[in-house]
Image (cartoon, grey):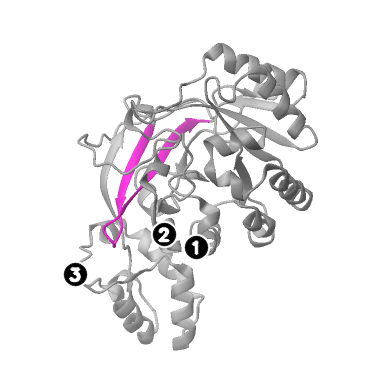
Amino acid sequence: MAVFRSAFDAGELRTEFEKAGIKTTFIPFIWKHLLHDQNNLFNHNLASEFQWEQAVPSLPSAAYCLLRLKFKPLTSTVHSVVDSSDQVTTKLLIKLQSGAFVEAVIMRYDTRLGKYGGKPRPGGLRSTLCISSQVGCKMGCRFCATGTMGFKSNLTSGEIVEQLVHASRFSQIRNIVFMGMGEPLNNYSSLVEAVRAMMGPPFLLSPKRITISTVGIIHAINKLHSDLPGLNLAVSLHAPVQDIRCQIMPAARAFPLQKLMDALQEYQKKSQQKILIEYIMLDGVNDEEQHAHQLGKLLETFQVIVNLIPFNPIGSSSQFKTSGDEKVSVFQKILRGTYNIRTTVRKQMGQDISGACGQLVVSLPNRSSSKQSSVLPDIEDLHL
């Protein structure tokens, strides 16, 4: 079976068009028409030839020949859709052309609920899409289900963008978080290409609405702002000292904490943006008062938002337990009261469908999709 590239792979499409002497300005035009006729786009049988002339009018004949020969409008399909019991989280199991699977998670919010700065929040209904960047992950974090898969492969930029295309069928996506399967900065070139595509026409997502999460790949952080200015950076810190970090995140040995903090200091100096610090609460491991003080001292010179994340179980054999509510509350009060660090506690979403933070691992569900939807107060849009 011939291997085709995704029509949403901007780099490949641009290269092929340039070699053939076709204007690359046609690329967003192609995407616009593909997205406009969703019935044709999603109902097309990947095994049959796509009718490019009917789907995208007014292209040069050379473009049609090239598209038929090397590209498919979509190279992935939605294998299954599972909604959480409260209907606010939807997990998409996406089958790639290679036969591998990745997961993407839609989280729905109502930004009008709750208050921000003491005032009612503006806005309305919207959804955040959690996107995967790799099949599996090589970081091996001990509290994360994806890490148990090991690393299988990088996604192409087209396969990353196609997750947004698929999710748009189920909800209007306003925010993107690269917090799904894989370490985004270990698939750097595809990540950059995909994000640039999402910010351009016809998607036109604001960089302020895109967050890239990393365990701390220092060399990639050093060039991220130059390549993708204006995005939000989230760092999976999870421990205030190097030895604890190495215990729960083996990859931390390659990225010493002090060198990581130096890189973040330089990133913040260039970007002038707050950094989101992700901190998973593990009972008896990193959630004691002394750890809160260590974290406060580590971050007191930064402009950050600390997001405390309840540990989501990843099986009966897990060596970790979830921190109690009282411990989380005390931890938060120390960061806020003693160090004046804005600190939030992430609400658990999608836990019953293994779609919550740290639970993404490919498994074939037996639950069917539901078209109902509901809303939650906004928690992902942290106004970085």
Residue occupied by mark 3: 48
Amino acid on which disc 2 is placed: Leu
Question: Which label sits on residue 190?
Answer: 1
Crowd rating for badge 2 (residues with CA inside 10 Å; few <14, some 14–19, many 20+): many
Q: Which numbered dot is residue 155?
A: 2
Mark nearer the N terminus (3 vs 2): 3
Distance CA(mark 1)–CA(mark 3): 27 Å
Tag 1: residue type?
A: Ser
Q: Quadrant of residue 301 in the image?
A: top right
Quarter of the image containing the N terminus?
bottom left
Q: Residue 296 appears at what percent x and percent y?
A: 73, 27
**Towards the viewer: 46 or 55:** 46
Are the residues flagged by discs 1 and 3 in contact, CB closer than 8 Å? Answer: no
Q: Is residue 36 above or below residue 13?
A: above
Marks 1 & 2, CB-CB < 8 Å contact: yes
Q: Secondary structure at mark 1?
A: helix
Disc 3, disc 2: CB below 8 Å? Answer: no
Location of residue 41 by image quarter: bottom left
Magenta stretch prevailing secondary structure: strand
Q: Residue at x 33, y 77 (%)?
A: 70
User: Percent from the top left, x then y, of residue 24?
Assistant: 50, 77
Q: Secondary structure at mark 3?
A: loop
- The residue carrying pointer 3 sits among few (fewer than 14), some (14 to 19) or many (20 or more) residues within 10 Å by Cα, namely few
Q: Residue at x 30, y 76 (%)?
A: 53
The magenta stretch is 89-110
Q: Is residue 295 left or right of residue 375?
A: right
